[in-house]
Amino acid sequence: MSSIKENLSQIKEHLSDDVTLVAVSKTKPLENLHEAYNAGQRIFGENKIQEMTQKWEQMPKDIAWHMIGHVQRNKVKYMAEYVSLIHGVDSLKLLREVNKQAKKHQRTINCLLQVHIAEEDTKFGLNETELRAIAASEEFQTLENVHIKGLMGMATFTDSETQIRREFKKLKSLYDSVQNDFGTLSILSMGMSGDYKIAIEEGSTMVRIGSSIFGARNYQ
Ligand SMILES: *Cc1c(COP(=O)(O)O)cnc(C)c1O
């Protein structure tokens, strides 16, 4: 089996300088994160706030922590002090809470709005109408402690490359078309271990990769 360091360098060969790699370390022990850190990785993604907070407490402080999972409003307060980017914002209500908690810590929290692009309905996210409604809402303009940096989406879990590509294309075109509604967007977060190469071809600027770096996850 290849090491985390080898996996990272192999993946990086496929990434140009304008694509950011988020190492998705959810469920993985600290020693795995240290190995990635020692290989130079400084951005880690987690999907549970409690687990991310424990890791943030124990890992070096120059790491940027990305929340990539579905966020419950009552837990935002636990990550507001340190989270660097929240990928999965899918409502104005959640944005309001992030803004409130960010303000308490006198910071601005960067967020992505999660868009539902998959043709299966098990994944979270906004549709185009809801996305545009947020941009147009008066309340959104008043939220001074959140900064919408871009969009995030997950393609259907399928072997069909045609379908995955179609879904990524849809997200990229939405990203282009809402550019000015949110100020200027710079992050399009799409692509995971199984589909990041297609995502990059379709315009991704940020990939979230877990199992190809750390190996398969073991959910107990
Ligand atoms: C787990 C997860 C990933 C990483 O998945 P891999 O297939 O292991 O690369 C990416 N994005 C989200 C939102 C995830 O929950």
Image (tube, rainbow, N blue to C red):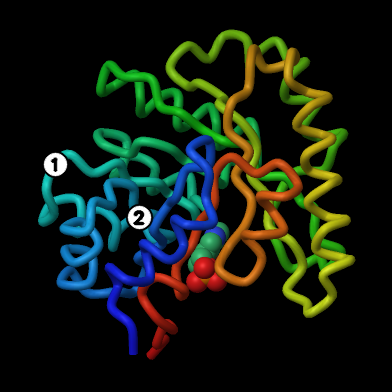
Tell me if 163 is positioned left or right of 34 in this view: right
| Residue 181, quarter of picture | top right
Q: Nearer the viewer, residue 74 or 155?
A: 155
Q: In this picture, is 213 found above or below 125?
A: below
Label 2: how many Cα within 10 Å (few below 14, some 14–19, many 20+): many
Label 1: which residue? 61
Disc with the residue nearer the chain's start (2 vs 1) = 2
Tell me if 188 is positioned left or right of 181 in this view: left
Q: Residue furthest front?
A: 13
Label 2: which residue? 49
| Residue 77, quarter of picture | top left
Q: Amino acid at mark 1?
A: Lys
| Residue 214, quarter of picture | bottom left
Q: In this picture, is 120 found above or below 68?
A: below
Q: Amino acid at mark 2?
A: Ile
| Image quadrant where one finds the C terminus | bottom left
Point 33% across, 47% down: residue: 43
Q: Give the Cα separation between the discs numbered 2 and 1.
A: 17 Å
Label 1: how many Cα within 10 Å (few below 14, some 14–19, many 20+): few
Point 25% across, 33% down: residue: 81
Disc 2 secondary structure class: helix
Q: Position of residue 216 (x, y in %)?
A: 44, 84
Disc 1 secondary structure class: loop
Q: Nearer the viewer, residue 133 or 205?
A: 205
Q: Position of residue 166 (x, y in %)?
A: 88, 56
Q: Nearer the viewer, residue 58 or 5?
A: 5
| Image quadrant where one finds the N terminus | bottom left
